[in-house]
Amino acid sequence: MSETSRVTWEGCSVLLDINDGDRLVFARLSPAAKLKIGNKNCSLQPLIGSPFGTVFQVDGTVLSPAQGNVNSADEIKDGQVNVESRDNRALVDNNTAQSLTGEDIEAMRKQGAKGNEIIEALIANSATFDKKTAFSQEKYRLKKQKKYAPKVLMRRPVARSICEAYFKKYPSKIGFLRVDTLSLLLSMANVSSNSDILVVDMVGGLITGAVAERLGGTGFVCNSYLGKAPYSMDIVRIFNLSDEICKRILRSPISDLLSQKETAEQILQHDDVCNVESQSNDQMCASTSIEEISHLSENGISDPGAKNTEPVTKACKAPKAGEKAQQEVIDLWKKNGFSSLIIAAPELDTWTLVRDLMPLLANSAPFAIYHQYLQPLANCMHNLQLEKMAIGLQISEPWLREYQVLPSRTHPCMQMSAFGGYILSGTKICSSS
């Protein structure tokens, strides 16, 4: 099926949001795929054929579409909040308010009671629930719902959701690239249809997948690398890209892309300088990308090298992306130049990389360079000005503030990311020499 399908299919990747962001899981759907939620192994087969955005509720070991409102905040009416006169000052937390014991709950489960029924029984047997404010009642209900009736939101894995998931759990794997920084990086590089984008991606393939997703099967994405070993692109497999889009993702070493004017000594020098770093980075990415998803999902996607992993996701293989570019295509790129350049290589020297890759761009082509720290970009910007290689140079620091919007309580979130890296952007000009 197409990656634009509204419903899931066997072999597609999904992002499972458990209990409103408490846990984020990447999984590939198949009849044998299972996910551990709490102490239960739940089959993911009911998710196949369901629309993206569906909310499932865990009843025992079965995932079924949730009924009724997903968020209990909808139960708070507009006028109720303003006339609320109760407060929690008289409440004493001495563990005596709940008369329902653990044995009683276990007995209800053996009789076939569902999670919502257990929650309603806990509320009915609480001596202090009616005395709490509407907000406290909502928090109590939500806390019990997460324990006895977890909800799973099935999200489509696109550039935004993938970046958010990695940034929340393992930001170092994507170079601390925040979602607003990623969107700004694509915009400053003018990634549009029928473009040939040169990419140096050392953040697990996130940039490569986001560019290919935006191109939509037009143009080409050239994932270049220094040395002999290409950088890991494991994240690209999560995007559900079609075969046509995957064919547009090509790989080529930078030494093959350099013009014939570049001497062999310079190419060898560049490879010797960066070969060790590129190989070590490739080994790190290759060994952590799939394992990270497996650890993040707790068996959402299993590590191919692991044994006796329970449960194991067995699914169809994703379309392979990143074939080696043919010489005819490389010659065409050398002749016409690339439409734009995107670099996200925290492990390499930024100025050396930009100096080598700038001649590969067409005149007036934009470029955007991401780095976690400011100083490498500042040095690169200074050298570009001295060499008169680009105009419109600027260093941007993206800033994103997330707000909680609920009835009568809208405010900035208490825990936010205060740092999103830096982007150096500009436009290449024709050299006067």
Image (spheres, rainbow, N blue to C red):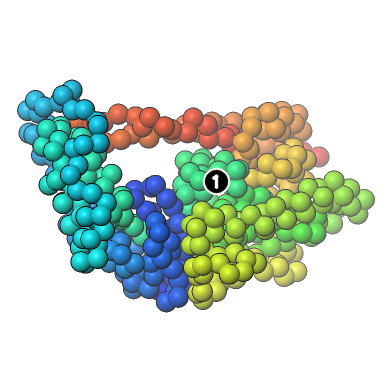
**Residue 325 sits in quarter:** bottom right
- Residue 81 coordinates in the image, percent (x, y): 12, 31
Residue found farthest to the right: 265
Q: Is residue 286 visible in this depiction of the protein?
A: yes
Q: Nearer the viewer, residue 8 or 130?
A: 130
Q: Nearer the viewer, residue 59 or 430?
A: 59
Residue at the spot x=13%, y=38% of the render?
Answer: 127
- Residue 414 coordinates in the image, percent (x, y): 38, 29
* Quadrant placement of the N terminus: bottom left
Q: Say above or below: 5 vs 53.
A: below
Query: What is the crowding at mark 1: few (fewer than 14 residues within 10 Å), some, or many (at least 20)?
Result: some
**Residue 290 sits in quarter:** bottom right
Q: Say above or below: 326 vs 187.
A: below
Residue where numbered disc 1 is placed: 170
- Element carrying mark 1: loop
Residue at the spot x=54%, y=59% of the render?
Answer: 294
Q: Say above or below: 173 vs 89.
A: below
Query: Is 226 left, or right, of 91 in this rendering?
Result: right
Q: Is residue 198 visible in this depiction of the protein?
A: no
Look at label 1 and name its amino acid: Tyr
- Residue 111 coordinates in the image, percent (x, y): 20, 66
* Quadrant placement of the C terminus: top right
Query: Is 97 left, or right, of 59 in this rendering?
Result: left
Q: Nearer the viewer, residue 329 or 242?
A: 242
Residue at the spot x=67%, y=57% of the render?
Answer: 287
Query: Is 325 left, or right, of 413 in this rendering?
Result: right
Residue at the spot x=60%, y=43% of the render?
Answer: 172
